[in-house]
Amino acid sequence: MAKFEPLSAVTLGDCAIYVEFSKTLDLEVNSAVQRLARMVHAKALPWVRDVVPALAGLAIHFDPDHPEVFGDATSASLKAIDDCLKQGLPKEDDAGRTVEVPVCYEGEFAPDLPEVAAAAKVTPEEAVALHAGSEFRVLMIGFAPGHPYMAGVNPKLAVRRRATPRAIVAAGSVAIANDQTVVYPYAISGGWNIIGRTPLAVFDAGREQPSLFAAGDRVHFKPITRAEFQKYRK
């Protein structure tokens, strides 16, 4: 990885700033961004409302009326980041949890699995084994609350997004496109290839931790049968 330093900083409305570290997705940069986010959050700066890591940058949400911002949130945010970088980022091994996610790869839960398998020149069963046999890392939560973007798709399964998105994708649907996997947190539109569905509640605003996933988590998908899927729902 080249030197890790801000490339640009832009405002997101009047209460947030986004600091970018790379113009392209780089897994090393993404890991560094996540560790930096934890450091900035741990500083507990009174003017910072939230710290949100993205694929290649960091969003800092702030109180525009706080006196420590001095009317210049950009400078305050860049100083906080610079202080953390001078201190040194924590080791990557200290990051994230391991999350096991049961997934049913059968029938109506996996409408695009046959097409994905055909593109990979494997059987549907082999495609499931390739997907469930990989370890994924959550790159960011975005697009919708609790919606994880994960790296780690086996290269054989790296297929393009669907030409025509679906108006509604069922909650819990596990899908792939290019070299990433996502899990839809609730019923929303989407153009990724659906290969399975988890019975777990991916996002629940009533939980202490609403999102099942967080940036930096390691994720393993565990194949389950249709009957097991129904048991999870009871």
Image (cartoon, rainbow, N blue to C red):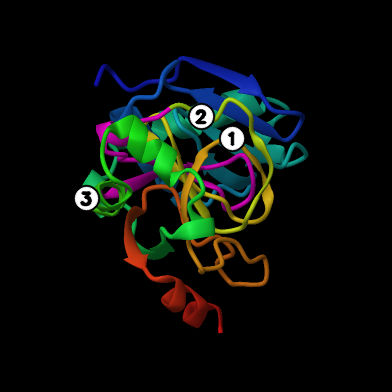
Residue 32 in sight from this viewpoint: no
Q: Earlier in the sequence, mark 3 or mark 1?
A: 3
Q: Horizontal and vertical percent for residue 118?
A: 35, 35
Task: Say if the magenta span includes residue 137.
Answer: yes
Please state which of residues 70 and 82 is positioned toward the viewer in this rendering: 82
Identified by mark 1, the residue type is Gly
User: Which residue has dot 2 on it?
Assistant: 161
Q: Are marks 1 and 2 in contact (CB under 8 Å)?
A: yes
In front: label 3 or label 1 = 1
Identified by mark 2, the residue type is Arg
Q: Earlier in the sequence, mark 1 or mark 2?
A: 2
Residue 41 in sight from this viewpoint: yes
Q: Quadrant of residue 206?
A: bottom right
Crowd tier of the residue under label 3, counting other residues whose Cα lies within 10 Å: few below 14, some 14–19, many 20 or above: few
Crowd tier of the residue under label 1, counting other residues whose Cα lies within 10 Å: few below 14, some 14–19, many 20 or above: some
- Which element is circle 3 on? helix
| Residue 191: mark in rendering | 1
Please state the extent of the stretch shown in magenta in the rendering. 134-159
Q: Quadrant of residue 166?
A: top right
Does residue 90 lie above or below 29 as drawn? below
- Which element is circle 1 on? loop
User: Which residue has dot 3 on it?
Assistant: 93
